[in-house]
Amino acid sequence: MAEEKKQGLKSSLEHIETLAVDDQNCGGKSSWDCVLLSRQSGRTGAKAFIDMICDEFMEIHGDRTYGDDPAMIGGIGMVEGRAITFIGNRKGANFRENVACNYGMSNPEGYRKALRLAKQAEKFGRPVVCFIDTPGAYPGLGSEERGIGEAIAQNLKVFSTLKTPVLCFIIGEGGSGGALGIGVGDKLYMLENAVYSVITPEGFASILLRDPSKAKEAAEAMKMTSQHLKQFGVIHDIIEEKSPEQTAALIKQTIIRDFDNLCSKPVEHLVRYRLQKIRGIGEVKGGKEWWHPLLEVFSRTQSLR
Amino acid sequence: MTEKTIRCPQCQKDVHVDDHKICPYCNFHFPLTVDERLALFADEGSFEEMSSTMQSKNPIDLAGYEEKILENQKKSSLRDAATIGRCTIDGEPVVVGIMSFSFMGGSMGSVVGEKITQAMIEGALTGNPVILFTASGGARMQEGIFSLMQMAKTASAAALLEETRTPLFLVLTNPTTGGVTASFAMLGDVILAEPGAIIGFAGPRVIEGTIGEKLPEGFQRSEFQMQKGFVDSIVTRESMKQTFSFLIKTHKRRS
């Protein structure tokens, strides 16, 4: 049994390696290939991208309530003369860092740090960039006791009406509510091999297919790759993956282009567009008569202010 | 009042319960149907359902999902896991949303997300308080990424209530977990819970699997969440109407 597992692991490791070197292969990757690539150790993480994109960067720690969560990096960077707040999930670049960063699984203080930094950015009119790369929020005792649900919920609410532009990039694993907790913004991009889903394929397989070994099939059925999510209109665009430096350069170009555009718009328009976009996601039959009033709500918020 | 005999899933005794459906031995609160729930607080005959025809699609073309929906519709005589509408409480108009755990574990897909959003928008437009009852195992996996996005949608609707200064009251019932906890369930101006309800983000088994030990007694129950500061008050079925009346009276929008 153990031997079999080892063999399986070895062949899937070899498989990832062939995928990683074969640049031409991008069209032919299966969903499961993307799952493996998005989780691959040594994949460029948020910290590395921040360092490659920023001319200067200052990390800011702590949520001012409980502590600092190493699984969430936050700070202020300068990118070609523009100050930007960066927030990202951090998995760590090697085994020791992985452990220190809890494999990128944040506790509530991580989300509250992100919230604090987002509000600070709003106050000073700085745009925000979020890098998403987490298997999910941490399902532990302390995490529950300190209200992981409440922390994520607050982020969703505040980010949806944050009065400054927000760009989100899924750079690796986009794991469920833990990813969404820093994933609400004006535009959402995905790296080519990143994935984004409501549950892991393993979880989906064990709950819905009643067989944890069917994770591969689950990954296909869940439609969690960048290609699928672009077809669904959930993400704005896919960013091609090349060498880490080249990928960072593409992300940087996107950031500069979008902020040149978004930062010149009145924030009310930005927020209105963001809310309309969020409202539009979902597939239902019937009950459409209640769709219109959003615009009326906006005018109402103006008149009440 | 009608009396019924049912088996209590918590203490395994056969018990007689009245309309409030509470186990006399262990205080287990049985799930209520939408009508039984409304009867606890709404003025008689005042409920008008909104978007009653809304139904699920199969957004990620998952095999078997449509059959699953049909099966649940037959079993529960509901169209999906949320019912919304307007009613009055002691004459005061409110918007109500009620989740039903009996429909696919109360999971939140596009229909639940849209209905809860519509209820909140109706509140924002009229200024009437919004009261939401949650009962959910979390996001509806069968709708893939669309179910995750309902968390953002319902939370952003709560932001609109904030902007329009419309009161939002939550009543968390057993169980309230996953994506519902991590979105609108935790965003009320006042968050109430029924006694003994499981309330949390990760399910108890997932946490036990992560930490490798048994969870302490009472973990994630309403009383625990109140002690930890996430539930404002525990409300009995008997006092529900009175509690809402008080909240409506004390949460008038300042003009």
Image (spheres, rainbow, N blue to C red):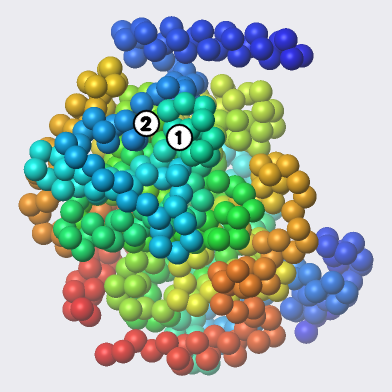
Q: Is residue B252 visible?
A: yes
Residue B153 sits above or below residue B30 on the image: above
Q: Quadrant of the N terminus of chain A?
A: top right
Question: Along the horizontal axis of the image, is B30 left or right of A47?
Answer: right
Asked where in the image residue A142 lies, by quadrant, the reply is bottom right
Q: In the rendered view, does A245 fall on the left or right side of A283?
A: left
Q: CA distance from mark 1 to mark 2?
A: 7 Å
Q: Which residue is mark 2?
A: A45
- Residue at 51%, 51% (x, y): give it: A107
Residue at (27, 17) in percent of width and height: A242
Q: Position of residue A35 (x, y in %)?
A: 48, 25
In the picture as drawn, the residue positioned furthest to the right comes out as: B13
Q: Give yes or no for contact between labels 1 and 2 (Cβ–Cβ under 8 Å).
A: yes
Q: Residue at x 47, y 23 (%)?
A: A41
Residue type highlighted by circle 2: Gly
| Pointer 1 residue | A91
Helix, strand or loop at mark 1: loop
Q: Chain of mark 2?
A: A
